[in-house]
Image: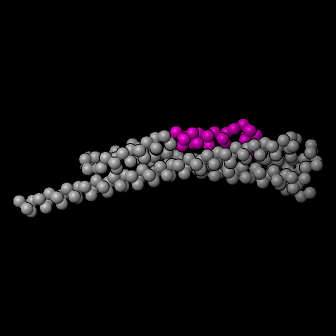
Amino acid sequence: MDSSEPTSVCEPDVSREQWQVLEVRWKSILALEAGIDSMRQRLEGTRSQLEAAFRHSLTVDEKVNALQADVAQWNKAKNRAHYTLPKVKEFVHRATWALGLPERKKLDEVFKAAMETQVLPSDIEKLPERLDSLLKDRQVLSAHGTAVDQECRNISAEIQRTLRTLQNNAAARVRDKRDTMRTKGKHL
């Protein structure tokens, strides 16, 4: 056995291949956690953008010249952000909390100790079940984060689209009014 192989005084019947399977599961969990953390950071930024979009108000010219239908669409889009923000906060909280779970910390210690000492843990028969449970939990959290992220992107795009439409239509009404006034002034 080479020096990179974990060995166990308590469980000599655990093969190198079995341990490698466990390491692959652990590394999959770490990769998912890295993705979840990246998504958490992105959603924290998205939350700020949605909060700003929700609080955005129209200029006086936009208020005066905007079509009521455009204002209604824009307000509807902004209200969707209001109902999505708690989902973002909840995901950020869960993603942060997930790394601090005692079970996760124990597994991290087990793998670090096994790598450093090359000695497998005495309760290795429970390890696959613990890893599978943690992996499933991370997969569910990742899927939840992906759904929230997609919903936020859609809402943000809708807010921007409805605001642009409102602003373009308000500017067009201003131009039409100006052109009408110029035309009336020529005929007098």
Left or right of residue 57, residue 25 in this image: right
Write the residue at 77% across / 46% down.
Answer: 132
Spot occupied by residue 4 in the image (x, y as percentages of width and height): 85, 56
Left or right of residue 77, residue 170 in this image: left
Is the stretch drawn in magenta largely helix, strand or loop? helix
Spot occupied by residue 38 in the image (x, y as percentages of width and height): 59, 51
Residue 132 can be seen in this image: yes
Quick one: 107 or 185, which is closer to the camera?
Answer: 185
The answer to which image quadrant residue 140 occupies is top right
The stretch of residues the image draws in magenta is 85-108
Left or right of residue 34, residue 5 in this image: right
Write the residue at 44% across / 52% down.
Answer: 158
Quick one: 1 or 124, which is closer to the camera?
Answer: 124
Write the residue at 70% across / 43% down.
Answer: 137
Write the residue at 94% across / 48% down.
Answer: 12
The answer to which image quadrant residue 24 occupies is bottom right
Is 90 covered by the magenta stretch? Answer: yes
